[in-house]
Image: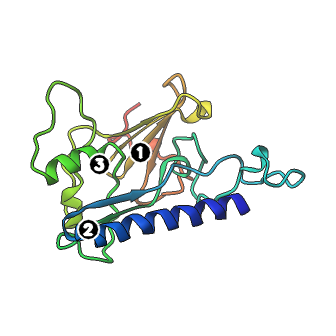
Amino acid sequence: FQQHHGNVTQLDHAFGNLMDALDEEHLTEETIVFFTSDNGPEGDGRGDPDNPGSQRDRTRGSTGGLRGRKRADFEGGIRVPGIVRWPCHIEPGTESHTPVIGSDIFASACDIVDILLPTERVIDGASMRPAFDGNPIARTKPLYWRTHISPQDCRVAVRVDDWKIVADETLTDLLLFNMQDDPQESHEVSAAHTAVFPR
């Protein structure tokens, strides 16, 4: 736990210095801040009681009851907290349950400063700016995750609205979950929703 708590303390201190610098330079009101974390806690969560502090002991952290851990495309491996601060544009203390992904930050920054997205390359993200006002995000592509070192049963995931598909390494074993009803991904529901996910 010392390593984990030390990292959190150091991050808190450094981020506080950054926020103080914005205040000192009178840039707070015109700066948007995106803050998020790395994905998924390491290891199996049990640690190594015989070698506290060792590399093998770096298995701390909680998924809050979500399925999977780091490197998995289940929610425990990909869902992270995010905070956005934009004075005079986002009401402090508001919450959004609209799912976003890291690639949305670029599209959001371009939207905020009124720069068109590049057209000579593929842009996967969408502006999350509508979510700041409680509106839906206009996506042309679904949320998508793919990992090469994850457990073989969850190498790829796609999410559209409340529906999420998790696929194995060969893309032949597909699981369907309704994230609104079942964020823990406990109940595979493809048989009950053939209109959403025909087999």
In this rendering, position of residue 82 left or right of residue 22: right
User: For the point 49% across and 47% down, which residue is it?
Assistant: 78
The relative height of residue 15 versus residue 192 in the rendered view (above or below) is: below
| Residue 85 found in image quarter | bottom left
| Of marks 1 and 2, the one in the foreground | 2
Q: How is the image coloured?
A: rainbow
Q: Nearer the viewer, residue 45 or 108?
A: 108
In this rendering, position of residue 80 left or right of residue 111: right
In this rendering, position of residue 51 left or right of residue 120: right
Give the percent coordinates (x, y) of residue 147.
51, 32
Q: Is residue 1 visible?
A: no
Q: What is the CA distance from the residue labelled 1 to the residue labelled 3?
A: 21 Å
Furthest toward the right, the residue is 50
Kind of residue sitting beneath label 1: Lys
Kind of residue sitting beneath label 3: Ile
Kind of residue sitting beneath label 2: Glu
Read off the residue under disc 1: 164
Q: Nearer the viewer, residue 58 or 136?
A: 58
Read off the residue under disc 3: 105
**Which of the two labelled residues, at mark 1 and mark 3, occupies the earlier sequence position?**
3
Read off the residue under disc 2: 25
Give the percent coordinates (x, y) of residue 13.
51, 67
In this rendering, position of residue 74 left or right of residue 198: right
Badge 2 element: loop
